[in-house]
Amino acid sequence: MIASLALLAALAAPGIAVLVRLTPFLTPLERFAHGAVLGIVVGTLAMLPLGTFFGLSPLVLFALAAGCVVLAGWLLLHGGLLGAFTGSPEQILGSLFERIEPLALLIMVGFTIRWLALWASAMTVDGVGLWAGHEYLWSDWPTHLGIASSFAYGNNFPPQHTLYAGLPMSYHFLTDLTPGAMIVLGMDPPAALSLHSFVLSVLLALSLYAFARRLAAGDRAIAGLATVLFLLGGSLVWVATVANIDQSHDLFGTLAKAPFDRAAQDDLHIQFLNPYIAFIMSQRAYLYGLPLVMLSLSILLVAVRRRALRLFVLAGVVAGFLPLAHLPTLLAIAMVTPFLVFLLNRRLFAITSIPWPGWIAFHASWVLVALPQLALQLRGGSSALSAFRVELGWLSAPDPWWWFWLKNLGLFAPLLVLAFFGYRLLPPRSFRLLLGLMPLFVIVNVLVFQPWDRDNNKLLVYWFLAVTILVAALVVRTWRRHRSATVRFLLAAAVATLIAGPILENVAQWEGQGRYLVLSAEQIALDGEIRDKTDAHALFLTSAGHHDPVMMLTGRRLFMGYWGQLWVSGIPYEQRQAEVRDLLQFKAGTEMRLLQETIDYVVLSSEDVSDPNVLANEKAFEARYPAVVSTQHYQVFAVSPEAIRAARPAAANGLQHGGQ
């Protein structure tokens, strides 16, 4: 753990130093919070060529970390800015956080304590197996465990798709590559993902606070409330808990046994979910995407005001790191940038006064940095954007559109409308920047961009960021203007309704009510044996289940993984899925097909079967191939000539001829 934390700190250092050197107009908190994430993203990108040419070893990571520290020191020393980081720890901390007011500090400490508990229980191991502390972790983290393990145990450079052999990694994998490096340094995959999520969650909270404070002209109360609303804001799902309390007449008993009613979420047709719980916690890539966007937008605000070409370029470079950091963020910002070109101008309709050279420079630098990453991701592969289509009203049916959004947003909806007409809630250019994010809501309600229409939520995260800042500004300004106890009580009650649902969900998780088995003890042991007895680059054929143990912890390549994950990624899987069934059943021509597909090992399971109606022909494999690993419910057969030779060197030749 210490080595992993040291690596994260070393990677973060150049990002902070670059912002200290190039963006003196940013506050120390902005340089630290945004810069740390920028450094980690760029440092993780550097692991790609290093891993490709030298492998991702502890020595390589040590060299990378040392290089980052030296670079950060040179940037600060060369710019005469190293003195900013000298002095007592109290002085440095005081300068860094600019004497944050007690309320803001309390908010940050509160989230830190909450996330310590969350990530300590996110993935736990006992005698039964590996458990996830939340349903969304159980659902999404098998994929992330598999990608991180592929880098650490499978030397997956240049990155190949972990669920479909032969395709490039058409996914924003940087938030899994960083934990992959932490695994190389000695952490187990679940712990590496959890520690990384905790550290980046704290940095994200600081970034959110710093960004909101910039837009609010330094108003710490608005920034603090906006941070709380974004991380804890949600729908009216809490009314289900209130109904349960009313029915049981037992407030504390209900809160102790079932504070959050997940079934009611579906019954009430709640589709817009809390960003942290549904996306940042489980899908992880927002840990990089959000801070990068907030940094880019913060620089753009100053670039437009100063009409400074170099700042436009810097903002474009920062946005250019998004393809491998988070593709939906790249899509969201690409959609709103045309609106920002006009809205950020001093005079809205004075087209001739727009700093066109700056905006051209922004987009040119953005494209130049992003294109190589997109080329690495796609390389002729399929894209989820191929499912682009019109879907009016999004997921509102069968509800009327207005009622659907009122349920899903609660008081966020009327408060947002009031904020549009609020007088001087925010500085004019800040207000217009947030207005520039509003078209995302319209777009999401008309168009769907990925196979699973619920993924439109990923774009709404950035709209919701703007909503929370506007609503926070409205609430704080109204609180200050009205000293009436009634008005302030109503404001406090309104805020309580905005955050009640996610708070109840957090309480349920804190109480340990959402534990889900990810892998059994047998499957964990199976993974260990596979790593010990098979080559790191071996290709495996498995039953392609959602919680396939080979996918999660071995780092080995799969002929095909879980079809659902392939579907949401826009990868046509049906033909290969049929081939997997035929091969497992050992239909005619299976031996030749195994050779043609260069499959090295076949894993047969009596319990993890994606299609229970199609069971594998275990006897056919036992008669032809040696089993290299056998457990109660699993057998791993070596089927390629190389794998057979490694399994039974003495009889390799005979088995090879017999298999052919």
Image (cartoon, rainbow, N blue to C red):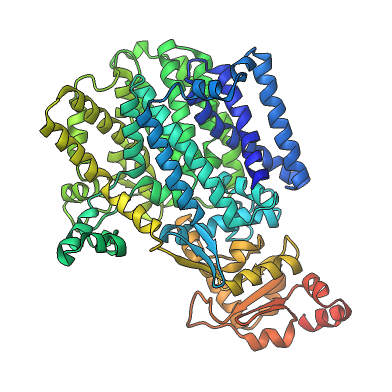
Q: Judge by depth and name the residue closer to the eye, 537 or 431.
A: 431
Residue 557 is situated, as x and y percent measured from the top left of the image, at: 65, 62
| Residue occupying the point 25% across, 33% down | 471
Location of residue 454 with respect to 623 vertically, above or below: above
Q: Which sits in the foreground, 302 or 117?
A: 117
Asked which quadrant contains residue 189, the reply is bottom right
Which residue is nearer to you in this view: 495 or 271?
495
Q: Is residue 459 visible?
A: yes
Residue under the point 70% across and 20% down: 74
Q: Quadrant of the C terminus?
A: bottom right
Dividing the picture into quarters, in which one does residue 255 lie?
bottom left
Decide if residue 157 is on the left or right side of residue 615.
right
Q: Is residue 324 left or right of residue 480?
A: right
Q: Which image quadrant for residue 111?
A: top left
Callout count:
0
User: Can you see residue 167?
Assistant: no
Q: Is residue 524 above or below residue 184?
A: below
- For residue 132, above or below residue 309: below
Above or below for 631 versus 207:
below
Q: Position of residue 179 (x, y in %)?
A: 61, 48
Residue 183 lies, in percent from the top left, at: 66, 52
- Residue at (45% x, 33% y) in the render: 206
Residue at the limit of the structure toward the right, as seen here: 650
Query: Which residue is found at the position 61% from the left and 53% from the top?
Result: 148
The image shows residue 107 at horizontal and vertical percentages of 38, 36
